[in-house]
Image: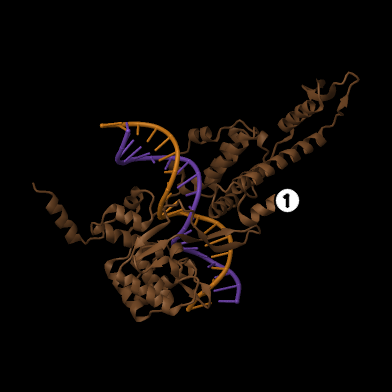
Chain colours: A brown, B orange, C purple
DNA sequence: ATAGTAGGGGACTCGTCTAG
DNA sequence: CTAGACGAGTCCCCTACTAT
């Protein structure tokens, strides 16, 4: 078992053979454990039949089978039903481990779930509850108490719900409980008012034309590699994680495109230590795309290359890749210098999409540039009227003629 | 001035339901 | 049969804080 697990952890992959192998070995191990726990002897009678005893309804019942394997099956089934009664904590770990093993989740998601577990469940009485002792009333009380104690927002609650659902579905599949997670949460009667509200500042998410001009002007005067990274972001609208993991070979000077094919990721390793690294996208992902760039953008790339001619990555300092966090700080610093409110790189992305949409660029084109799977995303999150009041008035005037 | 980290919550996709 | 509304689930950016 060790070797297979070791391989899985080291390379993040398992062949089908490995998986089957692993499952078999886990199964065999489980059987052995249960048989060892069986307190009654197993014997063969003179007639060749195999016997043992099992405690049924407070009484020992004699069981008889023709061969040994069958009698062992009975024993294993009996005790697995009776003995296996893991705690919520154990179930969470098993659930996460299983999904990780099968590669169902990105490491960032596992990080998220683990954080939510830590936040809501770790150190509470609920963590130690054995699944067979859990009923819907106990679950209900825990959920409601957690909402109140943490003064959760609706979003925060959804984090709690997802891990509880995961744990319960897993437990149900393993036949530890009959509680149906989806039914429970469906029926859960929680008023909207119980959640804490969050007020967001509306116009925070985008830069105005004037602000963009100021930033570009500043970068032209101070063309450091970091500042030029921000320039490239303004010219392409890519995600900051994509920006920070660009390589020189991603830029095609002939076709004037950039191949976006990887991104920066962060996750917690085995020891819980934070790791920042670059991951290649799976080929099928919509995020894998070629975006169209203009001559001005090519020019920016050339200047970047002059500053870091040998690098593996486009943006490096002293041979180290500049991380997305570093680029974010750079943008903050620029905002400070030119005297505008601090906004993050994602605001540049929103601005990019809004400018295109406001100037009647085809939606499908914007969708491709942004790397959205669904056109609705492009509309929902990025369409935003940045035109000034006079122009808005003019538009209404043109549309309404009565 | 810059890097590193933890954790929250926003950004995004996907599946399902429904009306027309 | 299809668009679109909606909620659930996943992924990633941002904030806040510490450290150097």
Of the pair A110 and A307, the residue shown nearer to us: A307
In the image, residue C14 above or below residue A132: below
Q: Where residue A157 sits: x, y (%)?
A: 50, 46
Residue at image position (65%, 52%) is A8
Residue C5 lies left or right of residue A135; in this view the side is left
In percent of the image, x 42 and y 55: which residue is there? A287
Crowding near the residue tagged with mark 1, few <14, some 14–19, many ≥20 C-alpha atoms within 10 Å: few
Query: In this view, which residue lies farthest toward the front?
Result: A254
Callout 1 secondary element = helix
Name above or below for residue A144 compared with residue B8: above
Mark 1 chain: A
In the displayed structure, does residue A139 sit left or right of residue A158?
right
Indicate the position of residue A82 as horizontal and vertical percent values: 73, 31
Side of A222 where A317 appears, left or right: right
Instruction: Pinpoint residue A79: horizontal percent, then vertical percent.
Output: 75, 31
Q: In the displayed structure, would residue A292 be above or below residue A295? A: above
What residue lies at 23% left-to-right and 56% top-to-bottom?
Answer: A360
A368, A39: nearer the viewer: A368
- Circle 1 sits on which residue? A2
Give above or below for A249 relative to A77.
below
How many numbered marks are there? 1
Res. A85 image quadrant: top right
């Amino acid at each position: 078992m060790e070797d297979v697990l070791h391989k899985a952890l080291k390379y993040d992959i398992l062949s089908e053979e490995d998986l089957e192998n692993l499952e078999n070995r886990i199964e065999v191990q489980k059987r052995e454990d249960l048989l060892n726990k069986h307190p009654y002897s197993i014997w063969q009678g003179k007639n060749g039949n195999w016997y043992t005893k099992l405690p049924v309804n407070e009484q020992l019942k004699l069981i008889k089978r023709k061969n040994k394997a069958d009698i062992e099956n009975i024993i294993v089934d009996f005790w697995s039903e009776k003995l296996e009664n893991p705690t919520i904590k154990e179930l969470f770990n098993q659930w996460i481990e299983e999904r990780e093993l099968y590669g169902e989740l990105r490491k960032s998601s596992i990080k998220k779930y683990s954080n939510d577990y830590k936040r809501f469940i770790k150190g509470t009485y609920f963590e130690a509850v054995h699944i067979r002792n859990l009923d819907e009333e106990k679950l209900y009380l825990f959920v409601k108490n957690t909402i109140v104690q943490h003064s959760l927002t609706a979003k925060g609650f959804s984090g709690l719900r997802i891990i509880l659902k995961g744990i319960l579905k897993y437990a149900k599949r393993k036949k530890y409980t009959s509680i149906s997670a989806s039914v429970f949460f469906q029926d859960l009667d929680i008023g909207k008012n119980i959640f804490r509200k969050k007020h967001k500042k509306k116009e925070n998410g985008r830069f105005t034309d004037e602000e963009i001009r100021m930033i570009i002007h500043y970068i032209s005067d101070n063309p450091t590699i970091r500042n030029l990274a921000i320039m490239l972001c303004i010219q392409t609208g890519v995600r900051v994680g994509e920006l920070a993991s660009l390589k020189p070979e991603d830029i095609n000077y002939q076709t004037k495109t950039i191949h976006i094919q990887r991104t920066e990721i962060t996750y917690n390793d085995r020891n819980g230590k934070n790791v920042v690294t670059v991951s290649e996208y799976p080929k099928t992902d919509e995020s894998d795309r070629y975006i169209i760039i203009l001559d001005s953008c090519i020019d920016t790339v050339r200047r970047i290359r002059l500053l870091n001619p040998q690098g593996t990555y486009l943006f490096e300092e002293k041979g180290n890749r500049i991380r997305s966090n570093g680029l974010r700080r750079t943008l903050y610093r620029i905002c400070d210098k030119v005297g505008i409110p601090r906004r993050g790189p994602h605001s540049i992305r929103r601005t990019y999409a809004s400018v295109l949409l406001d100037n009647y660029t085809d939606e499908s084109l914007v969708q491709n540039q942004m790397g959205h799977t669904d056109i609705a995303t492009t509309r929902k999150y990025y369409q935003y009227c940045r035109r000034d009041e006079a122009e808005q008035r003019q538009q209404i005037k043109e549309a309404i003629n009565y």
